[in-house]
Amino acid sequence: MAEFEEHDYDVIVIGAGGAGLRAAIEASASGARTALICKSLLGKAHTVMAEGGIAAALGNVYPEDNWQVHFRDTMRGGKMLNNWRMAQLHAQEAPARVLELENWGALFDRTQDGRILQRDFGGHRYARLAHVGDRTGLEMIRTLQQHAVHNGIDVYMECTIQRLLKDGDRIAGAVGYWRESGKLVLFNTKAVVLATGGVGKAFQITSNSWEYTGDGHSLAYSAGADLIDMECVQFHPTGMVWPPSVRGILVTEGVRGDGGTLKNSNDEQFMFNYITPYFAAETADNIDEAERWYDDKRNNRRTPNLLPRDEVARAINTEVKAGRGSPHGGVFLDIASRRTPEYIRRRLPSMYHQFKQLADVDITAVPMEVGPTMHYIMGGIRVDADSAASTVPGLYAAGECAGGMHGANRLGGNSLSDLLVFGRRAGISAAEYALGLGTAPSIARGEANASADEMLGYFDRRDGENPYTIQKELQDTMHSLVGIIRTKSELDEARSKVAEYAGRTKNAGVEGHRQYNPGWHLAMDLKSMLTVSEAIARAAEMRQESRGGHTRDDFPDPDPEWGKVNVVVRQGRDGDMQLVKEPLPQMPAELQALFEEAH
Amino acid sequence: MANYTMRVFRGEGGGGEYISYPVDVDEGQVVLDVIHTIQATVAPDLAVRWNCKAGKCGSCSAEVNGKPRLMCMTRMNLFDPAEGPITIAPMKTFPLIKDLVTDVSFNYEIAKTIPAFSPRPPGPDGTHRMMQEDIDRGQEFRKCIECFLCQDVCHVIRDHPENKPNFAGPRFFVRLAELDMHPLDTVDRLELARKDAGIGYCNITKCCTEVCPEDIHITDNAIIPLKERVADRYYDPLRWIGRKLKGK
């Protein structure tokens, strides 16, 4: 019998980035005994790396902005695959969530008349992103963290959850381990909110940190919940490409929002060659109009440098493949010749710092070199829009690990607002569910013990394969076979390789002992990475069209029939992964009308 | 590619030793890359904290050749391999957990003792108005990534652990100064700064400012103004007599 440290709660929130913190604050404020569990120290979650801003139709810079325009931008950016109700709630509630942060101490950059300043970003019709220079995520996480510490939430830092436990169909608990001591921990809980973020560490070139191993996706899948849209992966167009050790680190879209342009080795603003018919009506087709747009958005169309991320990432990929790339295999991002050094340092201080320190490049003097980097997964746990409830009673999800909100492609700035809007909703719903339960669920000890055996089993195979080797091969496979441009034969190859890695991971071994042992932690994280990798590769194989972040070389165009369905991934009774097509939720007529108006 | 020798502290609890690892270093690599290489090849159980690898999260603090630094922002080409091995040690001020990982819970406990931000009511339209020039300083302080290098280097607790119960440290003087200067906040924390946070212990040697990876002017912009505010209130002779007369 395994020994567990045990705790009892009404609600546990797994993940302490923006969504998790916001959920925990709300669950606790609703009267639920709440625990917040995170793999890292508090305040270090991936939200801290978000740069550009929080999209919210505050209308401070353009009074004509409103939730309907934001909703329309979001749906069109997602190529209409979004859950319309999530996109609607998000657009309606984001302004209140931003003002709430200010009321909790956040200091956003200001307009001349002392209101919250908003900046331009890709796919947004108006300047819409509330921001703090280019460190908005830090401001957000610190504000939530400083608010949360006074709210009676118990925080479990450096604690990783490995399995959710159920009582019949409903959630009953979770087991995991303390990273520091390696001791096992068991939570008896009525409800779980998953807010674990993304899956980037399954890919070679990514802007994501080590924590992003798809834990929430995998925990939910194993507990019987549905995942949707797993084929929809966002490659951010602008990651650093040089030096090799920093390849993939994010370069904020704010560079382009603040006037930066993309150029190829012929010094050509190539984005003018990549305006698809879908966005032609709202995009400037000449440099003069694009330049005028920065100061006059009412009479000019947006620069193609700020097309949505999927469009820009594909364009860069094509330019590099055509031999028009920069010396280190990217393209040029130039703000140096377009804005003053003072302006650049004030608006983009951490970009200045990052390039100066890591690449010896002064971005106020010369262009940056950038290229696509795996950044975000639109797909995730299928949730009810209003309640954030998954298909498993007592299990909720918010933020990047939830699916639906962003459709096939997320607009920049819509993530931080997503975290706040749906983090809050998940916290409310989980608390209401937990406090309304007649009898507390009880966990199945056998399942907890089986999980313990699995966790500790790695120490029985000291001669087993090094998990770092398996992770590296997985990252190479996902990068080269399930990357920006996909094709059936490569996806099939990826699927069989992922199956091979899964077999090898079962026989992986670790050195040393249980105390703070990264090799052991990685072996356990690999399990989640392999589950999401299989889901991504198979969903990508199934969707025979190109839409948003999912591009098929063998099916290069969008197909209206595929635009009506989600690919749903769930675990079958035999334990195998099953994929089915299911229809998208139907948008009501009054919202549909927003897409029929002339732009 | 260049060949370096890394002397990395390995150990836990009470003790440990420096182990030398020869490594090949690629162009542009930082210290954290090299630690990761060691981890992935010869020492998979080498404990290190890190997250963003871009100087934004403040997780990978350590002492590199004796200087408190973020490993992810320290380029290997700062060092000449001919000048001997590069020594990587955990932060000294905090109790060791294992290898390069220390117990920084001291900082999280202090954070809890600082009374929450409490804003004045919003204006008639339900929002707050603040001018950019009134929040520039606060934004400087809020750049803090909580790497705790300033806490690590501060000799008040580095050399005298016995001061820890009575001293919040530079990171939290920055936080107190930030709240004190916040245009909307209504709470008075000067008594806390003086008494429990022990700002008087600081004798402005500026070590904290020197190691701050965010270039926050901790001493000049946070600590000294806070000290002046405390001195004005508690050590102004007229106020002192006033308090005596009122029996406070």
Image (spheres, rainbow, N blue to C red):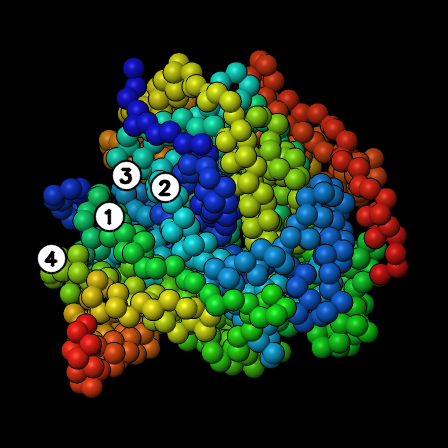
In the picture of the structure, the residue carrying the numbered disc 1 is B103
User: Which quadrant is home to the N terminus of chain B?
Assistant: bottom left
- What secondary structure is found at the residue carrying circle 4? helix
Nearer the viewer's eye, disc 4 or disc 3?
Answer: 4
- What secondary structure is found at the residue carrying circle 3? loop
Q: Residue at x 52, y 77 (%)?
A: B132
Number of marks in the rendered image: 4
**Relative to A369, A46 lies left or right:** left
Chain for disc number 2: A
Q: Nearer the viewer, residue A256 or A30?
A: A30
Q: What crowding class fits label 2: few (fewer than 14 Cα within 10 Å), some (14-19), or many (20 or more)?
A: some
In the picture of the structure, the residue carrying the numbered disc 2 is A154
Please name the amino acid that badge 3 sits on. Glu
The disc at residue A180 is 3
Q: Residue at x 15, y 42 (%)?
A: B13
**Relative to A161, A495 lies left or right:** right
Please name the amino acid that badge 1 sits on. Asp
In the picture of the structure, the residue carrying the numbered disc 4 is B162
Q: Residue at x 63, y 68 (%)?
A: B125
Residue A281 picture location, percent across and down: 84, 61
Nearer the viewer's eye, disc 3 or disc 2?
Answer: 2
